[in-house]
Image (spheres, grey):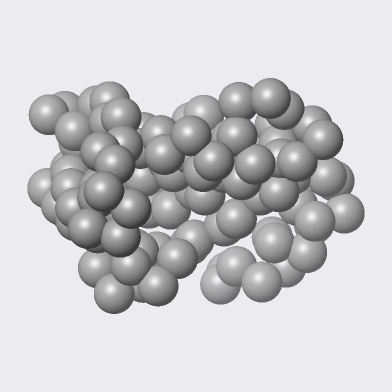
Amino acid sequence: MSSLEDDKAEDVVTIDLRGRSAMADHMVIASGRNARQVATIAEKLAERFKEATGRTPRIEGKDAGDWVLIDTDDVIVHVFRPEVREFYQLEKMWLPSDALSRLREDQPH
């Protein structure tokens, strides 16, 4: 999370998937302002993960920069351009409705 914040990722949300999905323990969703920033955030996150663990995460979508997925096995990170994030609404699919309501209340209007 601090890596994402260091790279100016916006609207970072962490979703606990334990007991809900076998694909990972946590999902992190964040936004970058444009395709270049999305790709850079993902690249730096992957580099930091490799430095910390010695493992290279799987990355998809970095070339396009609209939606980049970084899969570290335990954590899946999605970095979106804001318009793409709004279109797919992953938070709506994965967050419990009460958490989603609190998240919306925290968003600037």
Whole-percent x, y for residue 73 in the image = 48, 34
Q: Residue furthest right?
A: 98
- Residue at x 26% of width, y 48% of height: 54
**Which of 72/11 is in front?**
72
Answer left or right for 90 relative to 48: right
- Residue at x 27% of width, y 31% of height: 59
Residue 34 shows in this picture:
no
**Which of 95/47 is in front?**
47
Whole-percent x, y for residue 102 in the image = 78, 64
Whole-percent x, y for residue 81 in the image = 32, 44
- Residue at x 80% of width, y 56% of height: 99
Q: Quadrant of the C terminus?
A: bottom right
- Residue at x 52% of width, y 49% of height: 28
Q: Relative to 48, is 106 above or below?
A: below
Q: Relative to 67, is 40 above or below?
A: below
| Quarter residue 103 falls in | bottom right
**Which of 98/44 is in front?**
44
**Which of 29/19 is in front?**
19
Answer left or right for 83 relative to 46: right
Answer left or right for 16 relative to 9: right
